[in-house]
Image (cartoon, grey):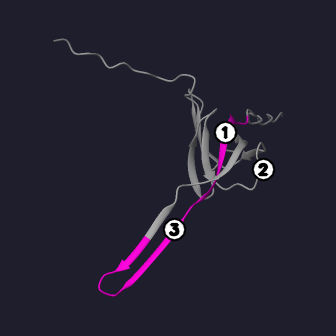
């Protein structure tokens, strides 16, 4: 029996992405997708710009910052404020009659990535000294 060939499905449109730092965490963001981040102090339908861009891949070239890329930014639109799933923390010490039950729901903001931009400025060439 002949072996079936594995089809390679490369996404050419969604090949560009950025890795940004916000709320002490790093997120892998693609355009036209929504993500849940820690609560951002902005109203619904507001535009938010993230300047702490660590890496950008535009499909052809990857740019890595040291630690951030100068002039790069990611534009976000706030869709809604919500709460994450409830997490139950239960601690018990056996044979001691000590039990502690605690719950937590994280405050989140759902955002849509509008655009990922880099600065297209080129470094100025130094002037040649004339004798």
Considering every residue shown, the one lying at the far right of the view is 131
Observer-nearest of 15 and 91: 91
> Is residue 84 rendered magenta in the image?
no
Query: In this picture, is 122 found above or below 70?
Result: above
The answer for how far apart the CA atoms under marks 3 and 1 are is 29 Å
Q: Earlier in the sequence, mark 3 or mark 1?
A: 3
The answer for how far apart the CA atoms under marks 2 and 3 are is 27 Å
Query: In this picture, is 99 found above or below 85?
Result: below
Q: Position of residue 2 (x, y in %)?
A: 19, 11
Mark 2 and mark 3 in contact? Answer it, CB < 8 Å. no
Q: Residue at x 46, y 74 (%)?
A: 101
Secondary structure under tag 2 reads loop
Secondary structure under tag 1 reads strand
User: Magenta region: which residues?
Assistant: 90-119
Q: Which mark is residue 43?
A: 2
Q: Earlier in the sequence, mark 1 or mark 2?
A: 2
Instruction: Report the predominant secondary structure element of the magenta stretch.
Output: strand
The answer for how far apart the CA atoms under marks 1 and 2 are is 14 Å
Q: Position of residue 40 (x, y in %)?
A: 70, 54
> Is residue 93 rendered magenta in the image?
yes
Write down the residue under mark 1: 112
Considering every residue shown, the one lying at the far left of the view is 1
Mark 1 and mark 2 in contact? Answer it, CB < 8 Å. no
Write down the residue under mark 3: 103
Considering every residue shown, the one lying at the far front of the view is 97
Q: Is residue 16 left or right of residue 123?
A: left
Q: Residue at x 47, y 23 (%)?
A: 10
């Amino acid at each position: 029996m002949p072996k079936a060939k594995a089809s390679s499905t490369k996404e050419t449109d969604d090949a560009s992405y950025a890795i940004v730092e916000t709320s002490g965490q790093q997120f892998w963001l693609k355009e036209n997708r929504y993500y849940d981040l820690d609560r951002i102090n902005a109203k619904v339908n507001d535009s938010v710009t993230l300047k702490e861009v660590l890496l950008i891949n535009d499909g052809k070239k990857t740019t890595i910052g040291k630690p951030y890329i100068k002039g790069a930014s990611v534009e976000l639109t706030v869709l809604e404020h919500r709460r994450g799933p409830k997490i139950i923390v239960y601690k018990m010490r056996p044979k001691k009659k000590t039990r502690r039950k605690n719950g937590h729901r994280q405050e989140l903001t759902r955002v849509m990535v509008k655009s990922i931009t880099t600065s297209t400025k080129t470094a100025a060439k130094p002037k040649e000294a004339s004798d």
